[in-house]
């Protein structure tokens, strides 16, 4: 009898544990998202008491919508959530066949937006929004996927910024073989957009996967990629400082202390740290800088402010010279032109809200006979474009 009691107790414990784990992992054993052979995708969400459930994501054809962007109203392409259909408490929606890409999505449950999919454990943060993601392979997104190739390392380091007066956090990709070798490598300084931080390019941009795959295929030279935090009033991403888990803002964010210098003024501190702690080529021919949106402005400004520092410049979805300093900026561009460089690459989507600014900037460059290359794509101010640009820019370096 004692053995039977123990066995029954064990059975109850196992069943209770399984039930608890089932609740932890979503409540029901369903598949979501289900990527089918024809590249259609079915989303499922368990909500028997919900009145309406919708799915929102960048796989939906966007519509022009006015939004607040850093304190100003702009018109952007924004996807409108689509209705899901309920059966036996499970809500479903199936897409049309989707092209190869990395997609993000979330649910809207009874009007509450940004509800996560409990059956998909992979999440990515974009500014203050956290969404699920999935990849459809067989094309462009193969570059963003993990393959059986030599893998580089991604580390988060702290460096001293005397210009700003405090330590800051940085993300650094080193190619496969760096730790055991003796070679010196060129460096790409890769800069994020407004609201981002030192995590943006490695998470949303899939930088490590792109670099691993391009290097393994012989399409890019092995290089170190340095991803900074472009907000001088921040030490690091949310949750990585004594400020705690604050909600990031589109422009700036915690901490509230006034920075002692701009990001551009403090950037030599980044280079000094990298060149003191890594085996790198310490000359102009071994340095590149590129960025998206705000990071594109930073790349533009850094390269003209320090004309002997970068031989390669990438400006993704960033307009031209703004404000009262146009004459000074034009003079700096002329000096940069005369000083010489190997590549000045501009890329933008043709529905980007900054598109006209990019066109105007190139007209200004044409006026002063400043050499550049231009890549225009479909689409707007979106990570889908910026991942493509990175994959095309990197093979042209060094």
Image (cartoon, rainbow, N blue to C red):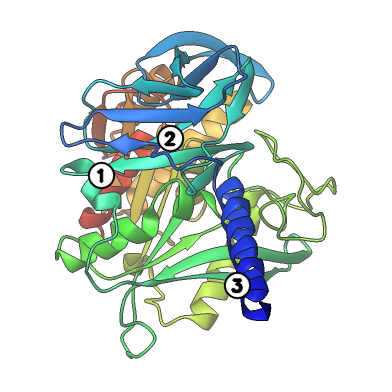
Secondary structure, mark 1, is: helix
Mark 1, residue position? 141
Residue that lies at the very extreme toward the front in this rendered image:
1
Q: CA distance from mark 1 to mark 3?
A: 50 Å
- Please give left or right for residue 98 compared with residue 251 in the image: left
Secondary structure, mark 2, is: strand
Q: Residue at image x 24%, y 28%?
A: 40
Quick check: marks 1 and 2 in contact, CB under 8 Å?
no
Bin the neighbour count of mark 3 within 10 Å (Cα to Cα): few under 14, some 14-19, many 20 and up.
Answer: few
Instruction: Quadrant for the N terminus, please.
Output: bottom right
Q: Residue at image x 47%, y 51%?
A: 203
x and y percent of residue 254 in the render? Answer: 78, 46
User: Does the image show residue 346?
Assistant: yes
Q: Nearer the viewer, residue 208 or 302?
A: 208
* Above-or-below relation of 151 to 391: below
x and y percent of residue 178 in the render? Answer: 35, 82
Q: CA distance from mark 3 to mark 2?
A: 46 Å
Mark 2, residue position? 104
Which callout, 3 or 2, points to the residue nearer the camera? 3
- Please give left or right for residue 204 compared with residue 35 in the image: right
Q: Residue at image x 80%, y 54%?
A: 244
Bin the neighbour count of mark 2 within 10 Å (Cα to Cα): few under 14, some 14-19, many 20 and up.
Answer: some
Mark 3, residue position? 7
x and y percent of residue 68 in the render? Answer: 63, 18
Q: Residue at image x 62%, y 67%?
A: 8
Q: CA distance from mark 1 to mark 2?
A: 13 Å
Nearest to N terminus: mark 1 or mark 2:
2
Q: Nearer the viewer, residue 114 or 336?
A: 114
Nearest to N terminus: mark 3 or mark 2:
3
* Above-or-below relation of 335 to 346: below
């Amino acid at each position: 009898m004692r053995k039977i009691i123990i066995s029954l107790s064990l059975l109850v414990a196992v069943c209770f544990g399984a039930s608890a784990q089932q609740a932890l992992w979503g409540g029901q054993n369903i598949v979501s998202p289900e990527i089918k052979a024809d590249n259609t995708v079915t989303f499922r969400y368990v909500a028997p008491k919900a009145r309406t459930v919708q799915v929102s994501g960048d796989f939906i054809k966007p519509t022009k919508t006015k939004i607040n962007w850093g304190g100003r109203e702009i018109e952007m392409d924004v996807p409108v959530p689509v209705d899901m259909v309920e059966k036996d408490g499970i809500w479903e929606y199936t897409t049309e066949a989707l092209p190869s890409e990395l997609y993000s999505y979330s649910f809207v449950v009874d009007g509450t937006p940004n509800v996560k999919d409990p059956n998909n454990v992979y999440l990515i943060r974009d500014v203050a929004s956290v969404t699920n993601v999935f990849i459809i392979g067989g094309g462009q997104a193969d570059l963003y996927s993990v393959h059986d190739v030599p893998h580089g390392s991604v580390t988060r380091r702290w460096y001293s910024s005397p210009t700003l007066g405090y330590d800051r956090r940085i993300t650094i990709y080193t190619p496969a073989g760096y730790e055991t070798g003796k070679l010196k490598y060129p460096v790409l300084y890769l800069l994020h957009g407004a609201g981002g931080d030192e995590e943006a390019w490695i998470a949303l941009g899939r930088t490590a996967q792109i670099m691993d795959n391009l290097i393994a295929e012989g399409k890019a030279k092995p290089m170190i990629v340095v991803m900074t935090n472009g907000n001088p009033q921040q030490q690091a991403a949310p949750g990585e400082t004594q400020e705690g888990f604050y909600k990031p803002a589109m422009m700036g964010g915690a901490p509230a202390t006034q920075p002692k210098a701009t990001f551009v003024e403090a950037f030599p501190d980044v280079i000094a740290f990298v060149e003191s702690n890594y085996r790198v080529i310490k000359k102009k021919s071994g340095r590149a800088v590129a960025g998206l949106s705000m990071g594109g402005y930073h790349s533009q400004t850094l390269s003209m402010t320090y004309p002997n520092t970068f031989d390669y410049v990438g400006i993704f979805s960033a307009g031209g010279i703004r404000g009262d300093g146009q004459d000074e900026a034009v003079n700096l561009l002329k000096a940069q032109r005369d000083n010489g460089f190997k590549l000045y690459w501009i890329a933008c989507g043709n529905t980007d809200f900054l598109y006209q600014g990019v066109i105007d900037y190139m007209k200004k460059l044409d006026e002063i006979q400043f050499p550049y290359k231009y890549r225009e794509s479909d689409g707007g101010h979106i990570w889908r474009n910026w991942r493509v640009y990175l994959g095309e820019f990197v093979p042209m370096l060094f």
